[in-house]
Every structure is written in structure tokens, then in C-alpha cells.
Image (spheres, grey):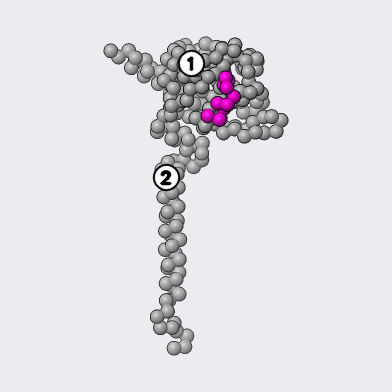
């Protein structure tokens, strides 16, 4: 019959419906995958996903041998547990002239707040260098002077063994990319670490007040538990 479909041939709309159904199925599958990959839709970048994961399930901090500006070496977990403090931790390298200076300013403000409120026996500040080959004790001492660090509130460390650098970065989710002139591009955050060596929260640099409040709350909770018979 002229102008009509051949007997048994599918109508053109049938093909469109089939194509649409297939595309819809692919889209739905993609949305499901995205939902799971972004922690239920709450995280859309590697950084926010990492923060979401840590908030839901604190991570143990691996032990490393660390060294301070005086050349004293000890285990990182030993230092964290020494006096029961909760730590606000950041990662720097001492030659940095950009982001690390912003981090330094945030930590200077935190140091002033900790000391003004008499919290230094409950909350500690800790900067760890991810450039252990360059950041040996003399470089650490110079950086501590420039940042006006007061050791009762703010400590600075580097890795004793440069081979531990990759494991350190991975354990805290720090991304470091070499840049011109021997510098680095890297992300930055405030990491809340308990005395028993657990990374419990990662906050942004603009969340200084929240970081201090959380660290103090965790420190007080830890003291309450230790006083319980």
C-alpha cells in the first residue's frame, strides 16, 4: 500500500521510544553511580568527598618518625599521645611564599586564641612539613622564628625519613604537585587529630573558630572519659 508501512515493519515511533528508554536507563545508572561516588550526593570534589568520609568514619593516623627544629626525633603517635591534647594539624613546606603564608596566618590567629583562653593544655597546634629533604632542623627553626611560633601552643615537625612522604600525604589526603622554581602547589585544610591518633575531621581554612571549638569539645570529652572510674 503506497505511503504505508510494510506489513510487520516497526513504526518509526517504536524506534524513538526504544532509543529514549535506553538513554533513560543509562542516565539513571549514571545518577546512581554518581550518588554512591559522591557520598549520597553530598560531595562533588575529591576534597569534599575526603572530608565527608572522615567525618563519618575517623581514620587512624599511621605512625612516622618525625624530627623537630632541635633535631629531636620521636614517633608521631608518641607525640600526639604525650599529654592528651587534641591537635589541629596543617601541612606546609618552609620555602613556601604563597599558601603556606595564609596557613601560617590562620595558625598565628589560632595560637593567639589558644593562649588567650588558656587552652594550651587541651588543644595543640601542629605543622608538619611534607618536604623532608629540604626541611631539616635549621630550616624548621628559621620557619618557627618567622611564624613566631610559641612551643607551648604550636609545634613544627618534619619527617625523619623522606621515604615516608608519600604515605604521610596519602593518609591525610594532601595533594602536592611540583611547581616551577622548586616550589609546590598543594591543598590546605585544618585537620583535627585526637590524642589516640585518629583523624576525626577536616575543615576549611575559613573554619578556624569551628576547628578550635571542635578540638576543645573533643579534649573535654576525652578528659571526662579518663576521669570516669
Q: Which tag is nearer the camera, tag 1 or tag 2?
A: 1
Report helix, strand or loop for mark 2: helix
Q: Which mark is residue 102?
A: none
Give the residue displayed 62% in from the left and 34% down from the top. Answer: 177
158 falls in the magenta region: yes
Say which label, 1 or 2, has the lower sequence index.
2
Q: Is residue 204 above or below residue 120?
A: below
Q: Is residue 158 left or right of residue 63?
A: right
Give the residue displayed 45% in from the left and 47% down from the top. Answer: 34
Q: Residue 20's quadrant in the figure?
A: bottom left
Residue under label 1, please give it: 79
Q: CA distance from mark 1 to mark 2?
A: 37 Å
In the displayed orientation, state which residue is furthest to the right: 181
Image quadrant in which the N terminus is located: bottom left
CA neighbours of label 1 inside 10 A, class few (<14), some (14 to 19), many (20+): some
Q: Is residue 150 left or right of residue 37?
A: right
The range drawn in magenta is 156-167
45 falls in the magenta region: no
Image quadrant in which the C terminus is located: top left
Q: Position of residue 117 (x, y in %)?
A: 47, 13
Report helix, strand or loop for mark 1: helix
Q: Residue 188's quadrant in the figure?
A: top right
In the displayed orientation, state which residue is furthest to the left: 229
Q: How many marks?
A: 2
Residue under label 2, please give it: 36
Amino acid at each position: 500500500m503506497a505511503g504505508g508501512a510494510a506489513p510487520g515493519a516497526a513504526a518509526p515511533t517504536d524506534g524513538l521510544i526504544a532509543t529514549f528508554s535506553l538513554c533513560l536507563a543509562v542516565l539513571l545508572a549514571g545518577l546512581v553511580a554518581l550518588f554512591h561516588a559522591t557520598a549520597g550526593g553530598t560531595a562533588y570534589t575529591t576534597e569534599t568527598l575526603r572530608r565527608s568520609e572522615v567525618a563519618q568514619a575517623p581514620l587512624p593516623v599511621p605512625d612516622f618518625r618525625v624530627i623537630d627544629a632541635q633535631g629531636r626525633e620521636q614517633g608521631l603517635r608518641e607525640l600526639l599521645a604525650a599529654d592528651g591534647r587534641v591537635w589541629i594539624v596543617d601541612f606546609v613546606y618552609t620555602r613556601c611564599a604563597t599558601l603556606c603564608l595564609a596557613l601560617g596566618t590562620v595558625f598565628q590567629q589560632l595560637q593567639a586564641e589558644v593562649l588567650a583562653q588558656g587552652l594550651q593544655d587541651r588543644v595543640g597546634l601542629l605543622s608538619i612539613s611534607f618536604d623532608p629533604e629540604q626541611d631539616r632542623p635549621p630550616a624548621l627553626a628559621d620557619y618557627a622564628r618567622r611564624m613566631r611560633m610559641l612551643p607551648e601552643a604550636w609545634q613544627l615537625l618534619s619527617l625523619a625519613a623522606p621515604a615516608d612522604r608519600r604515605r604521610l600525604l596519602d593518609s591525610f589526603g594532601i595533594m602536592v604537585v611540583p611547581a616551577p622554581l622548586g616550589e609546590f602547589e598543594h591543598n590546605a585544610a585544618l585537620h583535627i587529630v585526637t590524642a589516640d591518633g585518629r583523624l576525626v575531621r577536616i575543615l576549611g581554612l575559613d573554619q578556624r573558630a569551628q576547628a578550635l571549638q571542635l578540638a576543645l569539645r573533643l579534649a573535654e570529652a576525652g578528659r571526662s572519659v579518663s576521669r570516669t572510674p
